[in-house]
Image (cartoon, rainbow, N blue to C red):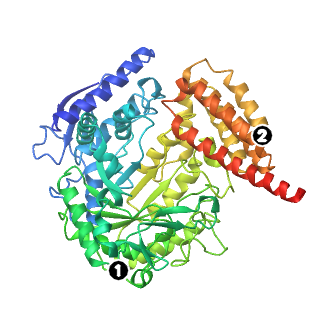
Amino acid sequence: MHIIEYNISETTKKSLDQDILTIQDILLKRGVKYPEINLRINSLSNENNLKGLPEHNVKKPESKIPLSFTERCAWEISKQSFQLIEDGEDIWVIAGGPEGAIYGTMEVLECLFGVIWSGLKEGDILTGPFRSIPVGVQKPSMAYRGMESTPSYEYQIADFLVWMSRNRINAWHRNSACWDKMDSTLKKKVLNICESRSIHLVIGEHVMDFFISENTFEEHPEWMGMRDGQRVKKAFVVILEASHLNSELPIQPCFSNKDFLDFYSEKIAAYIDKTPEIEIFSLWPHDGVNNWCQCKKCVNKTPFEQIYELAENLEKKLPPEIPIEILVYSNMLNIPKNPITKSDRIYTLFCPYLRPYIYRIYEKYEGELIIGTRYPQNDIINPVDEREYGVLFEKWFNFFDHNGSKIGIFEYGNPFSDETKRTNRSRYHYHPDIELRADELVYYAKHGVSVFYMCALINFFPDSYHWWATSKLLWNNYASSGLLEKQYYSAVSKTKGVALRKSLKDISNILLAEKTPKREISACYELLKEFPSSPAIKRYKIWLKYIESGRKAREMELTEDFENAIKQEQKIQAFLEYESPLIKDYLSIDYTLEMLKNFEGYYKSKLKKTNKQKSFNFY
């Protein structure tokens, strides 16, 4: 396949040539014949259309960036739209903008070459059956489909961004401090990839300390948050449902102080001015819960109202084409007491945080709504029942519907342990069920959500199915998860792939029910014996051994056998370190070891408490 005519930039053309050559090399090595095709790529955002452009139904996007975020989302969708038209041995990719040109070319490779962009390495890319190209205009369900994550190692970042583009993920969410510290050579490479592959940079997050110097509060102590009648930078904070995490945390500054708002927004505006690659700024407070200023002015406003006022102040200082996004999670989930001033440049991400992924959030919930209701008293941060988020989402949706603002989703995957110890799901590095993801995306689409970020560890362990399928569902919220499952696992193995998927689901479902899948793990081991040996099959076996060992530790925890649980965690850590050469490019070993050491530390504290109680009872 060759691009014989085009009106896209040379850098984008070079990126697409790279993708085409990669796939042709893979198919040649695997002995798969592929069709000889000439591509003619036409971006309507370029005033100079190619000669002989056939009739089509793709709309030409406006040349200027809309200042309204709602209109900007519609504009983004028009730029990403494309239509494929066959013309003899040629295929026209007619796109709204360069984004659509990229996605249209990916569609050709996926359909006529059977490509599944399933990993960061060339050897991890799957190929399956060929299929016909779609008829009519193709466009995304959501304008911004983003990732707040990086791979395990810095050397993987460039490949990760290419993987994002190939799977039509078009926004990369980064922390300002991390972005600022990135090696200059790597940053230049990242910027080139983002430009050539139309990836938006969304920068900001929990970076208050990045913008506030050490001596700021010494010069202005009145800007510090108040706790127990004192202005302080840090104070002891209570986490109601996980008391073992109670500790001294940064306290939010006094957001009711107008001078502080001016100072802080000026700092951010100056940073954005010298960082022109920022397309959207993400305005978040200090991370944590129950760490807000307790002065009279602040407690009369919800945390969201406080940050929204900061966003309004910042909005006046920024170029009009830069939107501001706010995150609602933790204490910020409390619905505002008062109407907010309408702004179509400020939008809000609803964050259903720390979920076990047992229920769809929209399922009927008849219990008490607890999360996001208690401010200025201490809130919980882990929901008692994740369906509470569905109740809260509807309340927030109605609030924004009345106030004219846009709502997006900031969803988590597998990274955080359940500190309440009610579940042990995240340990196993298996993702939420894709059917659950699919159903919730339809629910969000019906509410007009146009922005969706995934915040999770990028791990393709034991495989990449969840990430690949999620990217497909973000592009088309109404895609069939069943067909995606069949497409992926049939590419893993024509004869045994679907059976493998069923086996993995059986194990995951048993784990989710807090039971031990001994029989299911054994059956999966037997099934894997029928596959030819390969690094991918070895990773499945390592995962099985890992979860088998992890479940033993969980059983020991539940029976309060903490002494043996400690030994078991140490065995698991040693096992991961031993297998690291085979899995380190697919799983964050460092993060996983840190998580396991936290489990070990928790068991040690429980053992110490138990021994102390036994000693007390003896005397």
The spot of residue 464 in percent (x, y) is 51, 36
Residue highlighted by disc 2: 564
Mark number for residue 481?
none
The spot of residue 324 in percent (x, y) is 29, 64
* Depth check, front residue: 362 or 300: 300
Residue lying furthest right in this view? 618
* Quadrant where the image shows the N terminus: top left
Vertical arrangement, residue 259 with respect to residue 42, above or below:
below
Q: Amino acid at mark 1?
A: Ile
Mark number for residue 340?
1
The answer to whether 499 appears left or right of 473 in the picture is right
- Disc 1: CA contacts within 10 A as few (<14), some (14-19) or many (>=20): some
Residue at the image position 50 percent from the left and 53 percent from the top? 412
* Depth check, front residue: 90 or 197: 197
* Depth check, front residue: 303 or 102: 303
The spot of residue 92 in percent (x, y) is 25, 36
Residue lying furthest front in this view? 619
* Quadrant where the image shows the C terminus: bottom right
Vertical arrangement, residue 595 with respect to residue 534, above or below:
below
Residue at the image position 63 percent from the left and 36 percent from the top? 501
The answer to whether 464 appears left or right of 555 in the picture is left
Label 2 vs label 1, nearer the camera: 2
Could you tell me which secondary element the residue under label 2 belongs to? helix
Residue 273 picture quarter: bottom left
